[in-house]
């Protein structure tokens, strides 16, 4: 089959590889009809995530048709149309049974490696480094899905791929980001980063009762897309974000702030260049200028919600600001399984049509160039869907 | 083994009070019971104070003896007990069972009569009822499903079992063992038969916790000399406790989910030749 493989930093290729096979009784094989490039895949492209190996198959947002099931899977049959959550969860451990699917205790075969860095290992992820399990990803014609009796979620035939594909990651991720803000009716939420996760966070914040959403980015078409959803927009290259947010919120700051940027923040501020220098010298691993700003701008007693991915260590976290303003910080990989039924209902009832975010749909062969188009935010690119078959 | 011990020290500090707990140092060091330690502290303190007050030769001796008792109480280690192979600490330290059970079950080193060879203690908590965890382990034939160094275990009559282990070079090591102690849902201990080529013993304790069943495993292999000895020494690789820890992780996954998460054999941009596979895809050691 054809698969998008990570070769080294800045190089991904489409390779011919062996088809996946059932390895465990609870596995299934899915023939992939649609798969997307995620903003977090760009962290892999840029070499920010350790323990990648040349030849690893990328991709954790994929859906398709079940073509084979292991003997331990009794709730799926050949021909079922499913979306596959990006965290791999056993469904039976302490964490899965408490709805903390991305914290699954049993799905990471390389848990010992992750424990060295994090103390305890998170769940395995598709196509996201060997520290996260080394599972082959879904930017391919087929994928093996472990614990297939727990993860894959059947979607109705009348909804096209583009409307349900993002249930795999960015829609629930945006939703959990907004949910973590514990929004009370009419509150004001600021969202840094108007990439795909930010776009969903904006819409989900409104869905959960926000009165106003203020979206912050530097890319005009992304700010326009945010405005389409009803957000007020700020351009961080032109506006003094702190002063503007303060002005717009009656002088107190937003009730909650969402960092939908993560560890590769870009900016023009002095602290951005400080982070850039430190990461280039390997004195820090992640750049955190967005997180710092979000903590600084948030109103006293507010919440900073972090769907943006961090992998290692950051520097100069304004802990004093967070502490003395009594902030709550909430974060983590999305417990996708938790949100699927309710988000499918939102799609079916027409509250949201997730296909709004797609700007590029291409055959899988074009993946390498689309990675760069997406990363460099060229050609109005917000979200790329690959068609592998 | 020195390497393994160093790592163990780091790990013991880091994981203390969490899921993993390594207590080999404690087990090797503390051989005085808790009550005896308190008595040593009190008596040692009194004796030392008395001796120092007397300011005479006999007073000095009393002070020194008092200091030794203080040391014994504070550290829980008595050199005299150590030399005699007496351990009166375990039964009390772990809060259940009698001293006799703990001696049979947890201090395998003494049963093998020396400090030579591979000794490992690891523990892990499994989100399953104690009876189920106990039953699965009690059938030793299940052990090779998650213990990498074992190829097979066959249960024979009267608590005797035949064990086949396999080293990295593919060299087989075989022995017979018998169960030396078992208490339902609490403890299983076994030991190789007299005259086996490999002197080995193991025990596993089961405790109920708020998050399932805590399994505490002690294993010891005392290798014979020569080539066979070298093969036994290599059964667990460079860091035996890490391998046993991984074994226990597989045991937990097997009981909680019915299978062990793996990517061994999956396709990638480098597959096609075994040699080009990542280590975790070969089903070998971690990357």
Image (cartoon, coloured by chain):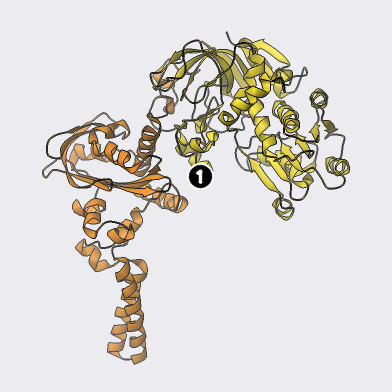
- Of residues A63 and B83, the one nearer the viewer is A63
The image shows residue B74, relative to residue A276, as above or below, that is below
Chain B representation colour: orange
Secondary structure, mark 1, is loop
The image shows residue A189, relative to residue A45, as above or below, that is below
Residue A315 seen by the camera: no
- Count of numbered tags: 1
Q: In the rendered view, does A90 fall on the left or right side of A289?
A: left
The picture places residue A326, in percent across and down from the top left corner, at 71, 52
Q: Which subunit holds the residue at mark 1? A: A
- Of residues B78 and A199, the one nearer the viewer is A199
Local crowd at mark 1 within 10 Å, few (<14), some, or many (≥20)?
some
Q: In the rendered view, does A211 fall on the left or right side of B17?
A: right
The picture places residue A212, in percent across and down from the top left corner, at 81, 35
- Of residues A341 and B101, the one nearer the viewer is A341
Residue B149's image quarter? top left
**Residue at (73%, 43%) from the top-left corner?**
A274
Q: In the rendered view, does B40 fall on the left or right side of A134?
A: left
Residue B63 seen by the camera: yes
Q: Mark 1 = which residue?
A: A119
**Residue at (40%, 31%) from the top-left corner?**
B257
**Residue at (33%, 60%) from the top-left corner?**
B93
* Residue found at the far front of this picture: A349
Q: In the rendered view, does A200 fall on the left or right side of B265?
A: right
Residue A215's image quarter? top right
* Residue found at the far top of this picture: A389
Chain A representation colour: yellow
- Quadrant of the image containing the C terminus of chain A: top right
The picture places residue B181, in percent across and down from the top left corner, at 19, 48
The picture places residue B243, in percent across and down from the top left corner, at 35, 39
């Amino acid at each position: 089959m054809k698969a998008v493989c990570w070769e080294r930093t800045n190089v991904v290729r489409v390779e011919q590889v062996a088809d996946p096979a059932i390895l465990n009784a609870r596995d299934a094989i899915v023939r992939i009809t649609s798969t997307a490039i995620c903003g977090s895949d760009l962290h892999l492209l840029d070499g920010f995530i350790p323990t990648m190996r040349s030849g690893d198959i990328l991709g954790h947002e994929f859906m398709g048709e079940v073509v084979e099931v292991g003997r331990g899977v009794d709730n799926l049959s050949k021909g079922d149309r499913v979306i596959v959550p990006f965290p791999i969860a056993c469904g039976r451990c302490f964490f899965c049974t408490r709805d903390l699917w991305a914290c699954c205790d049993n799905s990471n075969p390389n848990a010992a490696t992750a424990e060295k860095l994090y103390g305890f290992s998170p769940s395995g992820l598709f196509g996201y480094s060997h520290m996260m399990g080394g599972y082959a990803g879904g930017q391919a014609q087929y994928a093996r899905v472990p614990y297939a009796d727990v993860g894959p979620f059947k979607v109705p035939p009348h909804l096209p791929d583009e409307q349900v594909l993002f249930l795999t990651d960015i829609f629930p991720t945006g939703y959990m980001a907004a949910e973590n803000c514990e929004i009370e009716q009419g509150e004001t939420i600021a969202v840094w980063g108007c990439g795909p996760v930010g776009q969903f966070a904006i819409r989900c914040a409104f869905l959960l009762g926000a009165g106003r959403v203020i979206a912050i980015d530097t890319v005009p078409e992304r700010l326009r897309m945010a405005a389409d959803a009803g957000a007020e927009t700020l351009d961080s290259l032109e506006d003094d974000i702190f002063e503007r947010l303060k002005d717009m919120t009656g002088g107190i700051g937003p009730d909650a702030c969402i960092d939908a940027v993560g560890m590769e923040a870009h900016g023009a501020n002095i602290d951005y260049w400080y982070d850039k220098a430190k990461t280039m010298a390997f004195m820090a691993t992640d750049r955190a200028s967005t997180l710092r700003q979000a903590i600084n701008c948030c109103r006293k007693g507010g919440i900073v919600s972090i769907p943006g991915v961090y992998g290692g260590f950051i520097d100069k976290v304004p802990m004093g600001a967070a502490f003395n303003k009594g902030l709550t910080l909430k974060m983590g990989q999305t417990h996708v399984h938790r949100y699927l039924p309710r988000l499918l209902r939102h799609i079916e009832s027409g509250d949201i049509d997730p296909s709004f975010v797609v700007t590029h749909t291409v055959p899988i062969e074009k993946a390498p160039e689309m990675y760069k188009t997406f990363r460099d935010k060229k050609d109005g690119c917000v979200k790329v869907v690959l068609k592998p078959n | 083994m020195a390497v393994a011990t160093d790592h163990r020290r780091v790990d013991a500090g880091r994981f203390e009070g969490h899921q993993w707990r390594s207590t080999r140092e404690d087990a090797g060091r503390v051989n005085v019971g808790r009550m005896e330690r308190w008595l040593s502290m009190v008596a040692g303190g009194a004796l030392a104070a008395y001796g120092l007050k007397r300011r005479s030769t006999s007073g000095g001796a009393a002070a020194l003896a008092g200091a030794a008792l203080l040391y014994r109480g504070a550290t829980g280690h008595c050199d005299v007990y150590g030399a005699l192979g007496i351990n009166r600490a375990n039964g009390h330290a772990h809060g259940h069972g009698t001293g006799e059970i703990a001696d049979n079950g947890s201090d395998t080193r003494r049963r093998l009569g020396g400090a030579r060879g591979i000794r490992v203690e690891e523990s892990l908590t499994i989100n399953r009822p104690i009876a189920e965890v106990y039953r699965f382990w009690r059938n030793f034939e299940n052990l090779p499903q998650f213990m990498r160094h074992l190829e097979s275990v066959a249960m024979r009559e009267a608590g005797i079992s035949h064990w086949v282990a396999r080293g990295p070079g593919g060299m087989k090591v075989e022995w017979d063992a018998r169960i030396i102690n078992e208490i339902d849902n609490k403890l299983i201990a076994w030991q190789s038969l007299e005259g086996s080529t490999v002197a080995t013993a193991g025990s596993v304790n089961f405790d109920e916790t708020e998050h399932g069943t805590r399994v505490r495993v002690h294993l010891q292999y005392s290798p014979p000399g020569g080539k066979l000895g070298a093969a036994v020494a290599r059964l667990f690789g460079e860091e035996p406790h890490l391998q046993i820890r991984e074994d226990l992780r597989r045991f937990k996954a097997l009981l909680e989910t019915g299978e062990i998460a793996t990517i061994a054999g999956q396709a990638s941009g480098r597959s096609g030749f075994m040699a080009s596979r990542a280590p975790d895809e070969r089903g070998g050691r971690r990357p």
